[in-house]
Image: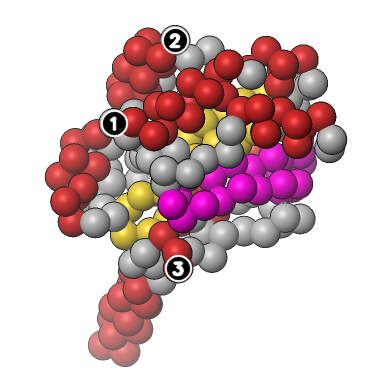
Amino acid sequence: MKQLLVLLLFAGNYAIAQIPQLPEQISPLLIGEQVPEASLKSDDNSTVQLSKVLSEKPTVLLFYRGGWCPYCNAHLSDIQEVEKEIIDLGYQIVAVSPDAPENLKITEDDKNIQYKLYSDADGQLIKNMGIAFKAPEKYYGMLEIKSGGMNKGLLPVPSVFIVSPSGKIQFEYINPDYTTRLSGKLLLAILKNM
């Protein structure tokens, strides 16, 4: 029994140690790999399975830091400007953040977002996507509040994935510099050439 306890403690510490300290150290899933299954929360706090959402049609899957981030809000608005054209190409837009469902609603209302926002408050999806890193300590309290107490200090590197209905990654844009984002116009050009 003692051996099992020691093994479990070691495994737990090893898993924690796998979260990179810096955004430059992440190891994201690659083009051709499958998006992992995840349970997310919608703005009305209902649980949705990511695979079911993705199966509806080809998807532009965005990961952003949260509604508190001005760069994220600017990016969400930029994507919204080309939303109709993206939809006309047969894609849906899905954005995921560590925000709690009630904070998703605030972002939707403030920015008049029409596409789907989902909560990954516990960070399981961003960890499994390989885009999670340990947030600077100054963010810990705010992240815990914004996530409804679920996030204990993780942030996603802002990312854009284009995903097939079967969940296969067809394109990705990931930049550890959270101030640099894939523009809506460039995303639209990429989608037109896929």
- Along the line of sight, the residue nearer the viewer: 71 or 36: 71
Q: What range of the chain is rendered magenta?
A: 157-177
- Along the line of sight, the residue nearer the viewer: 45 or 189: 189
1 or 3: tag closer to the N-terminus: 3
Quarter containing the N terminus: bottom left
1 or 2: tag closer to the N-terminus: 1
Q: Secondary structure at mark 3?
A: helix
> Which residue type carries mark 3?
Gln
Q: What's the distance in space between the residues labelled 1 and 2, CA to CA?
A: 15 Å
Task: Name the residue at the right extreme.
Answer: 193
The disc at residue 107 is none
Q: Secondary structure at mark 2?
A: loop
x, y (%) of residue 97? 42, 37
- Along the line of sight, the residue nearer the viewer: 10 or 22: 22
Residue at image x 77%, y 15%?
A: 88
Q: Indicate left or right for 52 with 23 as reference.
A: right
* Figure quadrant of residue 137: bottom left
Callout 3 crowding tier (Cα within 10 Å): few <14, some 14–19, many ≥20: some
Callout 1 crowding tier (Cα within 10 Å): few <14, some 14–19, many ≥20: some
* Figure quadrant of residue 3: bottom left
For disc 3, the marked residue is 25
For disc 2, the marked residue is 112
Residue at image x 72%, y 55%?
A: 31
x, y (%) of residue 178? 42, 46
Quarter containing the C terminus: top right
The disc at residue 68 is 1
Task: Name the residue at the bottom extreme.
Answer: 3
Residue at image x 64%, y 43%?
A: 161
Q: Is residue 125 above or below residue 192?
A: below
Q: Is residue 93 above or below residue 8?
A: above
Q: What's the distance in space between the residues labelled 1 and 3, CA to CA?
A: 24 Å
2 or 3: tag closer to the N-terminus: 3
